[in-house]
Image: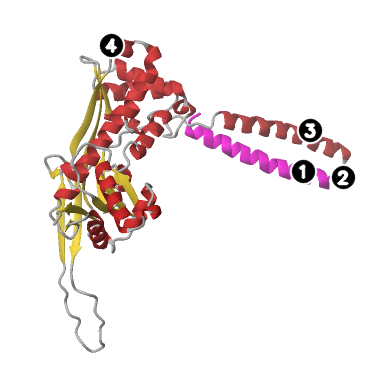
Amino acid sequence: MNKLDKIELEKSIKDLQARKNELSELILAENSVENAEKLHAEAKENAQALKLAEIKLQENSQIKGEPTMTKYLETKNSSRDFINILKSAGDKEAVVNAWGAKLAENDLKVEDKGLLLPKRLVDSIETALVEANPVFKVFQLTHVGALLVQKGLKSTDEAKVHVEGTEKVLQNAVLTTDAITPQLIYKAQSISTRTKEVTENFEEIYAVVVAELTQAIVNKAVDLALIEGTGNEDGFLAIMKETDAEKVKEIKSATLVDGIEDATDFVRGREGRKFLIVTAEQRKALLGEVRALVAPARVRNDDAELASEVGVDELIVYTGSKAIKPIVIVDQSYKIDMKDLTKVDAFEWKTNGNVILMESLSAGKMNKIKGASFITVTPQ
């Protein structure tokens, strides 16, 4: 059903409902038996026409060309169809065109085909983005896909009270602007020829797309944001390489406990949950320090309790392999912009090497003043 047909059908239903109410009133007011019988006959025909129109509207509620989710996209078959398109198509353009044709077969045509991946695949990827790496959730994630520009208004002047009759004093403020150029983060995963060709192995390929590819990209984004990013060369400026001391401060301390306390003091004025990111080894060392300061019976091997003891809202154990220092960061203070991994053009199958590729144009930078601090332990 197209849009005009739907509008006409809805108008017809509205007219039939109005006539139904009108006939009810006429029948009640009619004194002639003959006229009443005629009205009853018309009311019966009207009711039947109304019922058929409502059924037709319900059965054909999807408008061709309207960018809405169809039942097809909610089925497992749509996920299987998309994987098969990846296997048979080569470059991104071929994947996009083939998927567009498949959507058209199922009465769905949209301008941005990337928005309509199978719902099962979209939900799984979005879940992986949140759960694949425990650190990733603390970042502010956008999918603009453009140059990441940060602006900061810096001023140490306090607001003043104006005394009537006096001239307002001009205060000093500096607006700074800096930018990061996005770069590609990608993961290419080899698939055996047999797995690629045998339809029964759909679940294997699906698992690779959702788990291995998505997780690898998320893990890399986390490493770039915490320690690796050097600027425009890789699209990220890491927290531990941020040169603006008003955004990120390095805390030097003889102990982890004191360092975390000073790091938390630095970000205290920034609204939002405070996270402590440590390696498993750093967590063990911190637990030992805390237990040495208080009765061991009071401090169990529990992340929530340990976080409470050192004054943060949550402790996160970094699961990567990079040599990060303990970091205290405010929720959503570091911004990452990534090309949406749930879009069709994030995928490509390299047919000459049986490799499936997932990639995202990405950039990241500290977004807030007093957004994070990291601790360098310097034992005395």
Residues at marks 1 and 4, CA–CA distance in whole angstroms: 71 Å
- Closer mark to the observer between disc 2 and disc 1: 1
Secondary structure of the residue carrying numbered label 1: helix
Instruction: Return the mark for residue 203.
Output: none
Q: Residue at x 42, y 21 (%)?
A: 105
- As shown in the figure, which amino acid type bears the numbered disc 3? Ala
Labels 1 and 3: the sequence-earlier one = 1
Labels 2 and 3: the sequence-earlier one = 2
Residue for badge 3: 41
| Residue 13 in the image, given as x and y percentages of width and height | 62, 37
| Residue 223 in the image, given as x and y percentages of width and height | 21, 40
Mark 4 Cα shell of 10 Å, populated few (<14), some (14-19), many (≥20) = few
Instruction: Using residue 323 as the reference point, say whether residue 136 is left or right of it.
Output: right
Instruction: Return the mark for residue 24.
Output: 1
Residues at marks 2 and 3, CA–CA distance in whole angstroms: 16 Å
Labels 4 and 3: the sequence-earlier one = 3
Residue for badge 2: 31
